[in-house]
Each structure stands twice: as structure tokens, then as C-alpha cells.
Image (cartoon, rainbow, N blue to C red):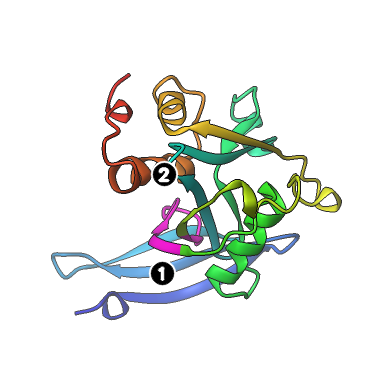
Amino acid sequence: MTVSDRIRIKDVRLLSDDHYTLKTTTFEWRRNNGEWQTQHRETYDRGNGAALLPYNRARRSVVLVRQFRYPAYVNGHDDLLVEAAAGLLDDAEPEARIRAEAEEETGYRLHHVHKVFEAFMSPGAVTEKLHFFVAEYDEKMRIGSGGGNAEEGEDIEVLELSIDEALAMIADGRIVDAKTIMLLQYAALCVFRDVTSWTTG
């Protein structure tokens, strides 16, 4: 039995379509014991996205960005967020989109981009699925200063950090963005295999 066999959509109402889409849905769910239960859920659809971590194995470094995130601020985070470069797909293929986004945000035109996994970031309410990538970089790939798109309100600072410092920033709370933590821990396990500091703190 698939999930489609266990759900009956009864009603879908649009609550907001200002920038992204917020809907409320009433459905019946067939529980494990066979009984049907009526449930109500709101879903926020902002489209799918991609994130990328540039790394330099020889220098043991990574490139991240730092920017203001209003939703984090209103939830008590009175600081800029340190993040991996990321963006919405906007109907583009994930690899093509993340190449463009990484160039726009970090200033690096990356050559070999490698997809490592996909993940739903907040499946209790948000439909978004992220495609995660890594790519090796060197200084010859830097073609600009990055910084993002000012017309879209982006005001991005580019950071080049050692992998050890980036992992320490997870441990001490300076990096609190989920996609970035996931990519840095992937890098610790699969790119910089001798790194152990990410488990401390």
C-alpha cells in the first residue's frame, strides 16, 4: 500500500499567494490500524532549491556566505547567518541553478559540481526539497566579488574559512543554518576525512 492509497484529499483552500503559496488542506488519513482519521494541515510552498559548498582540499578550506535573514531575526537570532550558497530553482535544473547562484553569491565560477544528496528541510509544514552539492575551487576560478543581487535585497559577505574553524562554528553556535551544517558535516566525513573536530564541542 502506498501513501496515495492511504490519503483522501477532501478540501484545499488558498490562504496566501503573495510571494509564495500558503494553503490549508483537509484530508482523511488511513492510520496503521486501518481507521480513517480527518486531519487539517497548512503547507507553505516556496519551490525547491539547491545549496552548494565549495571546498579546497589542499588548503583545507571552504567558502561560505554571511547575510541577514529576517525570519531568523524575528525568532531571536540577533546576528547575520553564516550559510552555504543557495537559492531556489525557479524551474531550472538543480546543477545549472546552483552554478549560477554560487557565482552570483561567492564570485567563483566552479567547474566540477557534484551532487551529494537531497533532503526535505522542514517537512511538517514546508514543501521545499533541497538538492545539495559540493565543488572543488581554487583562486583561478574567482571571476568576481560575489555579494548577491542587490535588486533582490541581497547584501552578502563572502567568507573563506578553514574546515576546522567552520566546524568549530557549528559547535559554538556561530553557524546555526541547517543546510550549512549538513554540508559541512558531509565535507568532514567525505572530503576532509581526517577531520575529527566536528564531533567535539
The percent coordinates of residue 67 (x first, y second) are: 68, 36
Q: Residue 57 carries which label?
A: 2
Name the residue rendered at 62%, 46% in the picture: 139
- Does 167 sit above or below residue 86? above
Q: Is residue 16 left or right of residue 127?
A: right
- Does 192 sit above or below residue 112? above
Callout 2 secondary element: loop
**Outermost residue toward the right?**
151
The C terminus, quarter of image? top left
- Does 53 sit above or below residue 88? above
Name the residue rendered at 75%, 45% in the picture: 145
Estimate how packed mark 2 is, as few (under 14), some (14 to 19) or many (20 or more) residues with alpha carbons within 10 Å: some
Name the residue rendered at 32%, 30% in the picture: 198
The percent coordinates of residue 189 (x first, y second) are: 28, 43
Amino acid type assigned to the residue bearing label 2 in the image: Arg
Q: Report the magenta residues as a range.
A: 114-131
The percent coordinates of residue 179 (x first, y second) are: 47, 46
Which of the two marks, 1 or 2, is nearer to us in this view? 2
Front-most of 114 and 50?
114
Closer to the chain start, of discs 1 and 2, is: 1
- Report whether residue 22 is seen: no
Q: How far apart are marks 1 and 2 (CA)?
A: 49 Å
Q: Where is mark 1, residue-wise?
A: 27
The N terminus, quarter of image? bottom left
Q: In this view, does 167 lie to the left or right of 190?
A: right
